[in-house]
Amino acid sequence: MKNAWSAWTGPLAATVLALALSACGSSGGGGAAGETTDAKSPEALVKANCISCHGNQLEGRGREKLNLLKVGARMSKEEIADKITNGGGGMVAFKGRLTEEEISSIADFLAEKK
Ligand code: HEC
């Protein structure tokens, strides 16, 4: 239910936001447009989103497939980002739950793990 809802509201909210931003473009204030999501570290994002399945240390809870400690050795950053975005094989898709920047920073972080 939650997913169906966000599938609808996601694009809609993006459109509304884009309209709102372009509408106030002439005001010159410009403060809100450059707003940065407070930069969460990839470690914090992983702790918050991934360890429930992949284990506290990302060791995979005894399942080699879920062990992410050396995931950078077998997957590229792009493949990791794709897996996080789209899920599959028992993994949830994080599209709509994490921003592209967040997914990209997690993928960077994991791709370093070799
Ligand atoms: C609901 C449980 C669950 C959560 C939460 C979860 N994963 Fe997964 N993940 C899985 C499962 C199950 C697989 C194995 C999928 C497969 O066999 O293709 C997997 C596979 C992966 C893989 C591919 C590993 C490989 O060697 O093929 C990566 C990378 C990954 N997860 C990253 C993450 C990241 C990063 C997060 C947090 C943003 C996360 N996962 C959250 C269950 C989960």
Image (cartoon, rainbow, N blue to C red):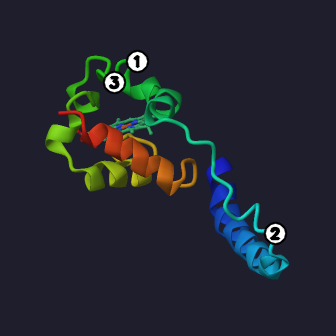
Helix or strand or loop: what does disc 3 sit on?
loop
Q: Is 17 positioned to the left or the right of 78 in the image?
A: right
User: Is 36 placed above or below 56 here?
Assistant: below
Q: Quadrant of residue 73?
A: top left
Quarter occupied by the C terminus: top left
How would you rate the neighbour count of disc 2 (Cα within 10 Å): few for under 14, some for 14-19, many for 20 or more?
few
Disc 2 to disc 1, C-alpha distance: 44 Å
Q: Nearer the viewer, residue 25 or 78?
A: 25
Helix or strand or loop: what does disc 1 sit on?
loop
Q: Nearer the viewer, residue 79 or 35?
A: 35
Instruction: Determine if residue 17 is in view.
Output: yes
Q: Nearer the viewer, residue 99 or 12?
A: 99
Disc 3 to disc 1, C-alpha distance: 6 Å
Dot 3 corresponds to which residue? 58
Q: Which mark is residue 29?
A: 2
Residue beneath the point at 72% across and 66% down: 13
Residue beneath the point at 29% across and 21% down: 59
Q: Earlier in the sequence, mark 2 or mark 3?
A: 2
User: Is 47 placed above or below 31 here?
Assistant: above
Q: Which mark is residue 6?
A: none
Residue 45 location in percent, x, y?
50, 35
Q: Is 85 positioned to the left or the right of 99 in the image?
A: left
